Image (cartoon, rainbow, N blue to C red):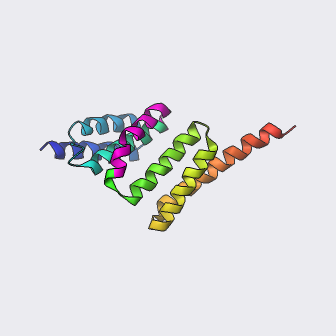
Amino acid sequence: MKSNRGAELIRQGIECGHRHDLERGILFLAEGLEFVDEQMDPRLALSAYHNMAIYFLHLGHVSIARGLVIRARSLYRRVEDPVMEARLVWLQGTIARVLGNFPLAISKHRRAVETFARIGEEREETEALKDLHEVERLRDSLTSDLFDS
């Protein structure tokens, strides 16, 4: 069955990501998407797009990651999952950080932390909070370097 093949490939792509084999993970995810009907299984398609965006971002391809997030925007809305919505905001914050937009990154990370806390996702709340502190440190170090004599 076509959708089972897509689900298996996407599962393999996510497993590759857990092993930090991001390039291979992207290949599995992209191939898996070829077998998924986004109208019939938006959650599975969203999972593939979301993870590909993360992998591309970690590989330094921020424009591709940003494009995938934009491409998947309607899927995030259709799925209506507070966890995925918080993950989207967190990912947007990470993209903003990489692009050097620290105010937006901080805002997005704060929102993700608050949402994860509200819905009881403690592990992801902790990770998003670490990212928030990292962005604040980056912002502060850049500003202090600017004004130190």
Seen from the viewer's position, the closer of residues 113 and 30 is: 113
Relative to residue 110, is residue 37 depicted above or below? above
Magenta segment includes 75: yes
Residue 136: percent from left, percent from top: 66, 50
Q: Residue furthest left?
A: 1
Vertical order, 119 against 64 (above or below): below
Residue at 49% from the left image edge and 61% from the top image edge: 115
Is residue 55 at least partly visible in the picture? yes
Secondary structure of the magenta portion, mostly?
helix
Q: Position of residue 68 (x, y in %)?
A: 39, 37
For the record, the magenta segment spans 58-77
Residue drawn at x 63%, y 53% is 133
Instruction: Locate residue 99 relative to residue 140 in the image: left or right.
Output: left
Q: Residue at x 38, y 39 (%)?
A: 52
Residue 13 figure quarter? top left
> Does 61 lie within the magenta span?
yes
Q: Residue at (15%, 42%) from the top-left corner?
A: 2
